[in-house]
């Protein structure tokens, strides 16, 4: 791969850690329901929320409706706040590894399925500074693993698909990137990522 190539990384599960058990339990407790029903409703509506088709208030109202509940505006706002905060857990080892790749000449970018509130919060994090371009599904109007999401991302980056190495922890997202012509790999652990980048 040429020095000017782009290292395009997923956010959640790669650059950041997934939600902690504590944060997940707190969301369920605030919702006032059982975990299985809450997470089923949460993920059922997540894709349109990530794509920017639903506002935060519409998303949480939709979850409440699926659960047969009625939440106050204050409870919905608290759930939205907790949800955003739960995704702000940096994987500092990955950030260190990718920052080193940046020093070697690679452009560092993020492509994340994320709603508006989370995208704005991610942009405010000091530990995201190594990444020069942050691309979010809520702004593209497309979500991974739709190949069109990767095509739109590559167009914004101004490069050819084969100039991009995409890294994601979900095999279906990696497959979507490959279908769009990107080079791609499944993130499994920090050691494997370091080894792969050193081999470029």
Image: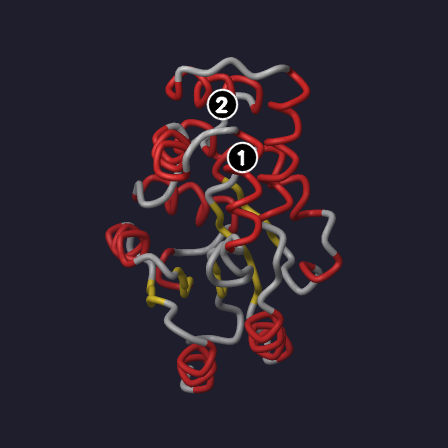
Q: Quadrant of the N terminus?
A: bottom left
> How many labels sit on residues?
2
Q: Are marks 1 and 2 in contact (CB under 8 Å)?
A: yes
* Camera-side residue of 141 and 11: 11
Give the mark, 1 or 2, whose residue is nearer the N terminus: 2
Please, is residue 140 above or below residue 132 in the view?
above
Please, is residue 43 above or below residue 61 in the view?
below
Please, is residue 115 above or below residue 98 in the view?
above
**Which residue is under mark 2?**
59
Name the residue: 38% across, 68% down: 187
Name the residue: 46% across, 16% down: 69
Q: Residue 151 location in percent, x, y?
A: 37, 44
Residue 142 in sight: no
Circle 2: element type: helix
**Which residue is under mark 1?**
115
Name the residue: 75% across, 58% down: 126
Q: Residue 25 location in percent, x, y?
A: 52, 45
Number of other residues with Cα within 10 Å of mark 2, as a class: few under 14, some 14 to 19, many 20 or more: many
Name the residue: 59% across, 80% down: 104
Q: Quadrant of the C terminus?
A: bottom left
**Viewer-nearest of labels 1 and 2?**
2
């Amino acid at each position: 791969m040429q020095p000017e190539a782009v290292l395009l990384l997923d956010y959640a599960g790669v650059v950041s850690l997934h939600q902690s058990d504590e944060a997940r339990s707190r969301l369920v407790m605030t919702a006032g329901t059982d975990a299985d029903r809450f997470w089923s409703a949460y993920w059922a509506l997540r894709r349109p929320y990530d794509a920017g088709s639903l506002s935060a208030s519409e998303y949480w109202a939709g979850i409440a409706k699926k659960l047969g509940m009625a939440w106050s505006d204050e409870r919905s706002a608290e759930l939205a706040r907790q949800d955003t905060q739960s995704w702000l857990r940096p994987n500092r080892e990955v950030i260190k590894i990718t920052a080193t790749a940046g020093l070697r000449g690679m452009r560092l970018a993020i492509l994340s399925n994320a709603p508006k509130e989370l995208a704005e919060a991610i942009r405010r994090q000091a530990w995201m500074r190594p990444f020069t371009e942050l691309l979010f599904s809520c702004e593209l109007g497309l979500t991974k693993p739709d190949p069109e999401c990767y095509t739109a991302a590559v167009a914004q980056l101004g490069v050819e698909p084969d100039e991009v190495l995409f890294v994601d922890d979900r095999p279906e997202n990696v497959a979507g990137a490959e279908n769009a012509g990107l080079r791609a790999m499944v993130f499994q652990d920090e050691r494997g990522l370091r080894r792969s980048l050193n081999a470029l």
